[in-house]
Image (cartoon, rainbow, N blue to C red):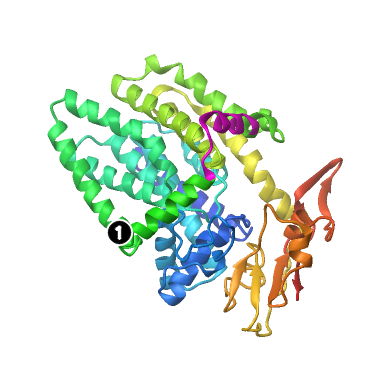
Amino acid sequence: MFKENLISRKYLVALFIGVLTTILFYSDFPLPHGDDLFFVGTAVHYADSGNFLNPGVYDYTEQFSEIRKPYWFVPLHMRLLGLWLSLTGTSDASIRIYVLLSIIITSYLLIKWFEISKNQSILFSFLIPIIITFGFRWSLRPECTAIPLLVTSLFLLFNYNNRWSQLFALIFLGLSTLSSQIILFLCTPLICVIAYFNYSHSNLRFFIINLFSAFIICSFVFLLCIDFEINQFTRMFLDHVSARTSSILANFNLFYFLSIELGNGMFLRLPSFLLLFFIFIKKPYLNSNIKLHGIALVIGLLISISVYAKSFEVILFFSSFITIIYCIHSLNNPKFVLCIIACLCTIRQGGHLLIYNAFCERSYTSIHQPLDINQTHIIDEYTIRKPLDWNFPKKWKIAPDFYTTDSRLLNKPPSETWIISQKNLSYFYPSLHQQEKVSIGNKKFTNLPLRFWEYQIIQ
């Protein structure tokens, strides 16, 4: 009887995840994000031409005017997405399926984590996919690849205690840092704790061998990703770091602003960090191994905040993820905490998607006439999806956003044709363009226009 219930439960969970991802797919999830063209533009160009380039960033800003390869970020995500598109074909559907697969993998691993902890409540199997889906702004950024790799690594480290699982865990951890460099700050303290436990159990030699082996493998993957162009990568990557670096005080001030002052942060974002704090102070209930592992992750979270608070969405996701780990290992009945996390995540991100589906006009038109190959087309994250469906013009650039003025559009050169969403025009050039936004009662959503996919061609 127990075996039959276990089988039926697995089918029920699989059905739930299948239904959830199907709904997300037909809800245009994930909606466009401002960084899409930087990363997916590279992957599409790589899939279509075999060249690991992003023509759209040429002369994007003064700081990156020399960029001819996408080395402002660690490149594994762009490579893997490009390989995926070369297999499945370049389309909006293929790209979004890649995101949904990342959500499925991450959810499955955390559900298995709960099962290993002897927690048989099926409620967790329903809450986890919801938290994963809405706990992070699942854009097409590198974290889309980094998070499943990170969760795989921690799943192996926390649940298995043999040399092979440790080796694969370290490899996955290294690959996650090759997808998003912020993972390095989160996990460096954890590596130190693992080394300490191996030392205390006289396994340090095997740990060093595993760590060195993982480092060699990940270094080789890294060199393949950058075509062995070490000097060029280092120069471009450091240029980006210097352009985005802030002091520790500035990072904590930004973190305070984003988590408390911005919008309804006091109610929507701050509670996620408070939940982690309250569970963290219950650390005496943890066994010594898990206790130090959890402390290491919390320290890594603080380092991430102090070094790069601009990656706030990822940090917010990490806080929920670490809270889940603490729930697994410290609370006998974590249902209440997980329900709170699920509600917070759903309101923060799921509410935006729900309002889009309920109130925004979702129809769109495609561009069927051939584009002038002599023109440089300025496009954004909305128009590349619809109406262009990731079919890039021969010459294209990413539409300028921050630090622009009306004169940038009024004085555009004749060689430029702008194919740009009305949403971005209204946001960055409000004195020239306006767009009606969704209103519910007295609440007006500045980032949700009634005609979501409306765009203009400006010649």
* Position above or below: 97 against 416: above
**415 or 328: which is nearer to us?**
415
* Number of disc labels: 1
* Residue 335 among magenta residues: no
Q: Quadrant of residue 451?
A: bottom right
Pointer 1 local density, CA inside 10 Å: few below 14, some 14–19, many at least 20:
few
Magenta stretch secondary structure, dominant:
helix
Residue 204 position within the rendered picture, expressed as x and y whole percent measured from the top left: 16, 31
* Position above or below: 409 against 288: below
Image quarter where the C terminus lies is bottom right
Residue 8 can be seen in this image: no
Q: Residue at x 81, y 55 (%)?
A: 430
Q: Residue at x 50, y 72 (%)?
A: 90
Q: Which residue has dot 1 on it?
A: 223
Q: Quadrant of residue 384?
A: bottom right
Residue 135 position within the rendered picture, expressed as x and y whole percent measured from the top left: 55, 41
**84 or 415: which is nearer to us?**
415
Residue 300 position within the rendered picture, expressed as x and y whole percent measured from the top left: 41, 31
**335 or 12: which is nearer to us?**
335
Label 1 secondary element: helix
Magenta segment: 244-257
Q: Amino acid at mark 1?
A: Leu
* Position above or below: 205 against 139: above
Image quarter where the N terminus lies is top left
Residue 271 can be seen in this image: yes
Q: Residue at x 76, y 54 (%)?
A: 427
Q: Residue furthest right?
A: 442
